[in-house]
Image: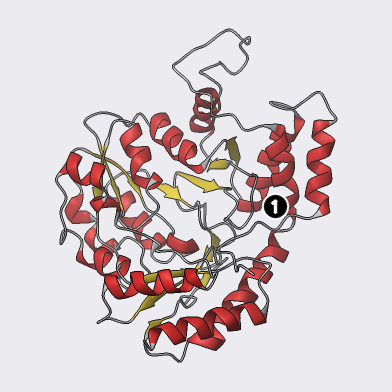
Amino acid sequence: MCIYLSRPDVTDREIEAVCSVLRSPDLSLGPKLGQFERAFADYIGTKRAVAVNSGTSGLFLCLSALGIGPGDEVITTPFTFVASATSIMMAGARPVFVDIDPVSLNIDPAKIESKITEKTKAILPVEVFGNPAGFDIICKIAGKHNLPVIEDSCEALGSALKEKKAGTFGRTSVFGFYPNKQITTGEGGMILTDDDALADICVSLRNQGRGKDAGWLAHERLGYNYRISDINCALGIVQLSRIDEIKAKRRQVAEWYREMLADDDRLIVPIEPADCDLSWFVFVVRLAEGYTMEQRDRILQQMKSRNIQVGNYFPPVHLMPFIAEKYGHKSGDFPITESASERTIALPFHNHLTKDHIATVSSTLKQFLAE
C-alpha cells in the first residue's frame, strides 16, 4: 500500500458534470466558463474573476495587465513554488527577493521597505502553505509606497485573516487548481480583482488579444492562449460547491497529525496562527534546529522506501541554478529561507487519509528520527 503525498477528492457529481459538458457542443468558451467565474467571485467576494489555464498564467497576466516588464522589479519571496518568481521573469521584470518570517514562513513585512527602489513596480507576496499571516501589514506597506499587491493565493483557497478572505488583500489575486490544491480543475487558475479595466485586459490577454466585442479574427493586442475549457470549469464548479466539506476534511487530517506529532521536540509542527482560518493546503513539518539537510534527505528517502510519499517543500528559489546564475545569488543571501528549506518535510496530506494512515506516517517518521 502506498500512502500518497496528495490526491484529488472527486465524486460522482464532478464526473457527471464533466460528462454533461462532453455531451454538449460547448467544450470551450461556453456557459460553464462564466458560471465558474461568477461562482468564484461570489465565494471570494470580488467583483470580477477571470479563469485561466494555470495559476502561473494568472500571475503572468496580472503582471502584464499592470504594465510590468523589462527594467522593472517586483518584490517577492524566495520560499515558494518557483512560479511566483518565474512569472515575474516571464514578464521581463526582475524578482527581488526578501527573506521570510521564521514562524509563518511568509515574506517578512519588516524587511520589505529596504528592498523598495525606484524600479519597484509591485509586491507579489505568497500565502505559503495557505497561510495569510502578515498580509494586512504587507498591504499597508504597499499602500504607503503606492505599489500594487499581486496576491499569490494559489495555495490559500478558503483561508482568511481576521475574517478577510485570502484573495481579497491585493489589487489582484491568483488561485491555482492543480490536483494537489484544495479544489481542482485538473489544471487551471483564477484571477480575482475589483478593477474592471484590469479584468478586461486579462480577459483579452488570455484569449490571444481579442477585443471585448470583436470578432474571432480581430486582435487588439499581443495575447496568449491561456484559456481554460468548459470541461475543466464544470469540474471546478462542483468542487467549489463542496469547499466547506473539503476544508473540514483537511482540517481533520491536520488535527490528527498535530495530535500525534505536536509533543515531539525533534519537530516544528505547523499551527493555525492567531486570527487565521487556515484551509490547510499541505502539512509541512520542520526538523528542529541542529538537524542538517543531509539528515532530512535521508529521512525523505527512508520514508519513501516504506511507500510513504513525502517532499521537501520548498527548495530556495534563489538558489535554483538558472536563477542564481542570472541574478548572482549565492548561499547565505537569505539565511532564514535556507535554514527552513533544509529541514522541511511535507507529509502525505489529502482528504482520503484516515486516522490509521496518519498513525502509520507519524510512527514511521518518529522511527527514522531516532536513527
* Residue at 56% from the left image edge and 87% from the top image edge: 259
- Left or right: 288 as drawn, with respect to 277: left
For the N terminus, the quadrant is bottom right
* Residue at 60% from the left image edge and 37% from the top image edge: 51
Q: How many marks?
A: 1
- Left or right: 124 as drawn, with respect to 10: left
Name the element at disc 1. Answer: helix
Q: Is residue 279 above or below residue 209?
A: below
Crowding around mark 1 (Cα neighbors within 10 Å: few <14, some 14 to 19, many 20+) is many
* Residue at 14% from the left image edge and 45% from the top image edge: 328
* Residue at 21% from the left image edge and 31% from the top image edge: 71
- Tell which of 370 and 82 is nearer to you: 370
Measuring from the top left, give residue 253's x and y in whole percent: 62, 75
Q: Is residue 149 visible?
A: no
- Left or right: 73 as drawn, with respect to 123: left
- Tell which of 124 and 81 is nearer to you: 81
Which colour scheme appears in the figure?
secondary structure
What amino acid is found at the position of numbered circle 1 in the picture? Answer: Leu
Measuring from the top left, give residue 78's x and y in whole percent: 29, 55
Measuring from the top left, give residue 246's x and y in whole percent: 68, 63
Q: Is residue 227 above or below residue 168?
A: above
Measuring from the top left, give residue 238's x and y in whole percent: 75, 49
Residue at label 1? 240
For the C terminus, the quadrant is bottom left
In this view, the residue farthest toward the front is 305
Q: Is residue 227 visible?
A: yes
